[in-house]
Image (cartoon, coloured by chain):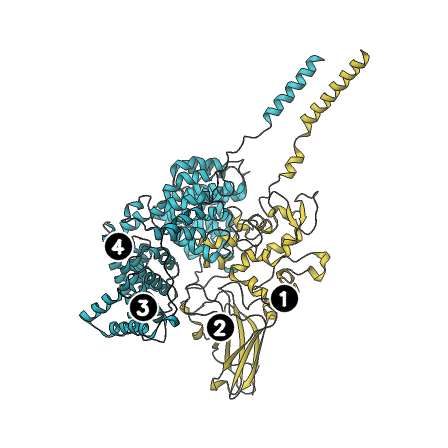
Amino acid sequence: MRALLVATFVFAACREKAAPAPEPPPPPELEGVVRERLAALERQVEPVPELPALEALDEGQRADAEGLVAMLSSAKGRMREVALESAADMGAAATAVWSALARDAQRPASERTAAAELLGAQASAAAALALVELAETAREAWLRSHAYWNLGKLGDDRVLLRLLSRLKYETDPEAQTLLAEALGALDSYAGVDVLLEIESGGADEGVRARARTALAGLAERSGEPDAAALRALWHSPDAGRLSESAPSKALELELWRRVDELSDEHFQLRGVDDARFALSHLGAWAVPHVAAALVERDAHTRLHAAQVLERTGARARAAGPALVAALDDPELAPAAAEALGAVGFEEGFAALAQRAARGNALELRVAAARGLGRTGSAVARETLLALFADAAEDADLRRTCASGLVHLGEGARVARFLAAELTGELGDPAGAERALGEWLERGAREEREGFAAALAEWRALDPQAPGNTILSNEAVRERRVARAAFLAGELEALAPGD
Amino acid sequence: MNALKTLLGLIVLGLLAWLLAALFAGPAVEEVETREFTSSQQCRECHPQVFAEWESSWHARAWIDEDVRALSNDFANTDCIDCHAPRPVFETGVGKRVLPRASRRGEGVDCISCHQLPGGGVAGTIDKPSAACRPAATLDLARADFCGVCHDQHQTVQQWKATPFAEAGTGCIDCHMPFRDGDPDLGRDHRCLGGHDEALVRSAVELRGRRAGEGWVVEVENVAAGHHFPTDERSRAADVFWRPLAPGAQEGAGDWRFLHRIRDPYRHEVDLESTLVAFGEVRAIPLEDPESAEGAEVALFYRLTPYYTDPETGTPVHESTVRDPRPGSLLVHRIVLRP
């Protein structure tokens, strides 16, 4: 009897010990980072006074400012110089007049241009803000171009984030060129990509030549041998080498104001989109600031800060340790996992592989797999291959692994799975089609046997809606059926034995 | 002594019973409580009709639709993910900005996006803790602000708030998720019909014309959309075209001529103004072309993508140069104006 009792208690004790799961690590401590930083910077940066209302100006003030516009728009040589030199001595009243005049569509173009030029010559913070507002609101591309040019000349970095936002909206190639140059003058090389696009595909030779000149100027300024080298450095973890001067406190304040716009107090995604875009186009100097927001109390801010780092890419590699720590924040972990992959922080890949394993929430596992798929690491390859090989795994996780494996050069291992997804009723046929296209392109680029011809046929099966037209969903379904049928006959040769 | 033995025996029996229960019962109850819904496919088993409706809806196509893929550059424009594959609304908060999710993106705006509650269970119209998904009656599901987490990003809910519908308590779901066959007992239609539904688009506006001097005034009135016409997407447009009518003819002849565009421009289109028609507004458009003096055929076309292309070259063209707006457009209304 005693033995039975003892055995019962021993069993019960052992069972108790086996039951509890390991405690997850405590999430990082959250703080009111944004409020704190904003308060500190607002103490250090003198606010720019608002421009006086035009109605509040007396006749003399208006006449002086307008007189200078008239003089500059008609003068040549030394007289122009005198007019521009005079601008520096004029106060906020003149800034208000020139700002209004430049935006007034009823005034002649020569006067509007002159007003913008006077704002540039005035070299005050208020003039810089007036010019950037002109760049944001002017309907005429030539006027926006003047605003960009003058902003570059003025060199006040407090407008940098607003100029970076213009990269998203500016559509005129000549204005884009001047915008990229203005950014360069502020130590930002975010405009290099658009310049390279214009140079290779611009509408006419004049525009392409102008972009080429701008690229040469930016390369020279950066100390890089050419535009391609500059672009590579800008998108690399070494981009910090490009910065020539420390950002002003006014720019830091602008940065934190943008971070503040990521919070859940801002409902409209438009503002959030703009903030994410501008912040992710800043130089390497901004990365520690954005990374600091990963422990902000507001969950929206934390998540979007991780997205900003993800979109910044390799330039944000220094944020790697902060992102690894963020993997322990349940709300932030999926976004941090994707960002870790995008910034390419190698020391964090093992942590990513751990999060992709069973026992974690599906949301985190998929994000970790996607993050791994963006790296070129052996850890990623092994992890994704193992997860993909397990047919009992979640279908969405396997899909994510398949796309990642294509990127990691293992397309042959997943091509059949992706081909089946093309015509499947569930899942993501569009994603599968994109991944298969990437696999064929890569094979053709690497001159692997049969890939060039297969890629040509794959492309020929696309009815290719020209221009801005979009194929109907029916046409797309037919295309995918045709492509799946084509691949069925080719996979034996392109992906043998798998 | 006997009493003590009996007591000990009872204790041993009790412990044995506990041991057997511990060995064979397992943690089944706990598993049900912590069940994680990893796909909306899981909802199909118990809710086949709702699932079928959702599956045929544009919410289900939010991630995979070709228009979305093209306009978002295959989601390389990651800003679009927030609303096209959102995390559960109840997780981020009704009235709060929606956040993007990492998994199940192919399911778009799905059952989980709208119904999953934080900590398990789903928002529904009844309380039923014994059901696998543990529904809890949740009034927030019917609020305009619930749909607004995505649809107010383009001010649709704000537009609705300025209409008499808001005051009368007629919300989004009354038009876009009506009761099946009008019967509340049958539940709501989860197809969430909207701008892709021809009948709904036609019912939203009226097109008419009247004589004005030697010419005409064409009128477009937003008679039933509880928000602007069109709304929500800058990719939507409604265009009025006309063509001359020969005496006695039933329809116009020759090329169509552009008269008016109703659209909210994209952010980068700084040279355009929003021309959306608010609820109750009558947009009066003069048609003064001398060729219309004998009569005119006027039509209102609705487009899911705003840009026209040259049929020969495929290059984008301005709407004012379009001679045949019909390809890619829905003919909403057509009228014939005769002197």
Asked if marks 2 and 1 touch (Cβ < 8 Å), the reply is: no
Colour representing chain A: cyan
Q: Earlier in the sequence, mark 2 or mark 1?
A: 1
Cα separation, mark 3 vs mark 2, equals 40 Å
Seen as rendered, the residue at the extreme right is B2
Tell which subunit mark 1 falls on.
B
- In front of the other: A33 or B32: A33
Residue at mark 3 shares a chain with residue at mark 2: no
Residue B165's label in the rendered image is 1
Tell which subunit mark 2 falls on.
B
Q: Which residue is mark 4?
A: A218
Number of numbered discs overlaid on the protein picture: 4
Asked if marks 3 and 2 touch (Cβ < 8 Å), the reply is: no
Chain identifier for the yellow-coloured part of the image: B
Cα separation, mark 4 vs mark 3, equals 33 Å
- In front of the other: A277 or A361: A277
Residue A94's label in the rendered image is 3
Q: Which residue is mark 2?
A: B261
Residue in the image at 66% along x and 34% along y: B28
Residue in the image at 36% along x and 65% along y: A134
Query: Is label 3 in a helix, a strand or a loop?
Result: helix
Compared with A240, A91 (above or below) is below
Cα separation, mark 2 vs mark 1, equals 26 Å
Q: Amino acid at mark 4?
A: Leu
Residue at mark 1 shares a chain with residue at mark 3: no
Q: Amino acid at mark 3?
A: Ala
Crowd class of label 2 (few under 14; some 14 to 19; many from 20; radius 10 Å)? some
Tell which subunit mark 3 falls on.
A
